[in-house]
Amino acid sequence: MPWTPVWYMRQAGRSLPEYRKVREGVSMLDSCTRPDLITEITLQPLRRYDVDAAILFSDIVVPLRAVGVDVDIKAGIGPVVATPVRTPADLAQLRALEPGDVPYVTEAVRMLVSELDTRPLIGFAGGPFTLASYLVEGGPSKNHDKTKALMYGNPEFWHALLGRLADITISFLQIQVAAGASAIQLFDSWVGAVGPDDYRHAILPHTSRIFSALGSTGVPRIHFGVGTGELLGLMGEAGADVVGVDWRIPLDEAVRRVEPGKALQGNLDPAVLLAPWDVVEERARDVLRRGRTAEGHVFNLGHGVLPETDPGVLARLADLVHTESIQPDA
Ligand code: CP3
């Protein structure tokens, strides 16, 4: 590729009118079990933006629901779990995930890969801390208090929980790669809530196991979280090929924090896209300039597309990234 590749986290979804249209009358999680809808929604952003990858339309709680966890996604709130997981007995909710539990994912990925031709499809799953937080808290949480209380106070249970979640995640990612996904991203979105020492002992062993289980597939592995400036080195050490960076630290500083040999992904503040175009342009150029100090750079936002974003700005931004970064002789 002669330019810096670009895609957007949450590129499908609420900022697109055609998304809202096909979702009418279908709940979020039901739409994730219909191969026709998964395929259509995954492709919608590619019709508008010249992005270099598609990301599967699904959600991090899809594999949990597939093994029987009573979880729903409430509009404007997020995942809500009927019976939170807080005691060893609650772990019975988390059996292993088999390919037969998510046939719609396999079918949709296969259809997408044939439609997309050479354009890569990114598969994804939730990271251990983020999934644990939804299960323990029972829903979205600002401070993840109950989750961290378990992490600090009951290490044995904590490791049992994260071990089960890692098994489910490994299986969910392997299913997507087996069906043809050509890269995977682990969204440990809320892991920035813990400090480096706790990350190393309480989370990294599980994340490492996830990435190493995917190693033999040969697909690039991306690792992302929000507010993870102090964890970037460890997130690379966990075995990712690409480390995602939010907007809170500049990419040239992230380069100093991540061990050599890794690429970076990011990191334009999604809120910048709500400012006038000349501001977007200047900020995007700055991200590209700093990204050149990395061994590889995938342009992205520092977190997901905000629902109020003008799709026209995202289209213009993808073009800008290409024209600014193109090296005709490369
Ligand atoms: O990037 C993409 O376009 C692929 C689709 C995707 C969705 N969820 C679809 C979705 C991806 C990659 C996710 C991952 C996800 N889900 C994460 C990690 C990424 C991140 O943003 O940090 C998390 C934390 C979740 C859990 C979740 N699901 C939340 C917090 C919400 C938002 C609730 C709300 O309405 O504000 C969801 C719902 C969700 N997942 C929507 C979409 C398109 C919106 C559903 C709707 O249209 O009502």
Image (cartoon, rainbow, N blue to C red):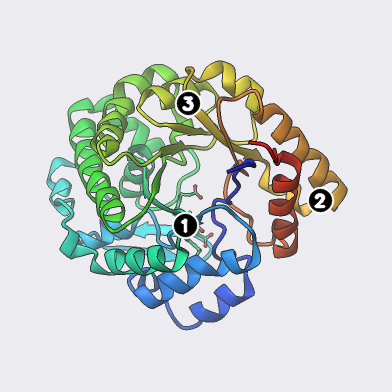
**With 137 as the anchor, is 2 left or right in this view?**
right
Which residue is depicted at the point 56% across and 80% down? 21
Which residue is depicted at the point 29% across and 49% down? 173
Which residue is depicted at the point 16% across and 46% down? 91
Position of the N terminus, as image quadrant, is top right
Q: What element does badge 2 sit on?
A: loop
Farthest bottom residue?
A: 25
* Front residue (pair 22, 6): 6
The numbered mark, 2 or 3, whose residue comes first in the sequence reads 3
Query: In the rendered image, which residue does mark 1 sit on?
Result: 118
Crowding around mark 2 (Cα neighbors within 10 Å: few <14, some 14 to 19, many 20+) is: few
Vertical placement of residue 240 versus 276, above or below = above
Proximity of marks 2 and 3: CB atoms separated by less than 8 Å: no
Query: In the rendered image, which residue does mark 3 sit on?
Result: 262
Crowding around mark 3 (Cα neighbors within 10 Å: few <14, some 14 to 19, many 20+) is: some
Image coordinates for residue 184, horizontal then vertical, percent? 39, 46
Image coordinates for residue 317, horizontal then vertical, percent? 73, 52
**With 318 as the anchor, is 111 left or right in this view?**
left
Vertical placement of residue 28 versus 9, above or below = below
**Quadrant of res 202:** top left
**Quadrant of res 296:** top right
Image coordinates for residue 228, horizontal then vertical, percent? 52, 29
Q: Which amino acid lies under the numbered mark 3 shown in the image of this protein? A: Lys
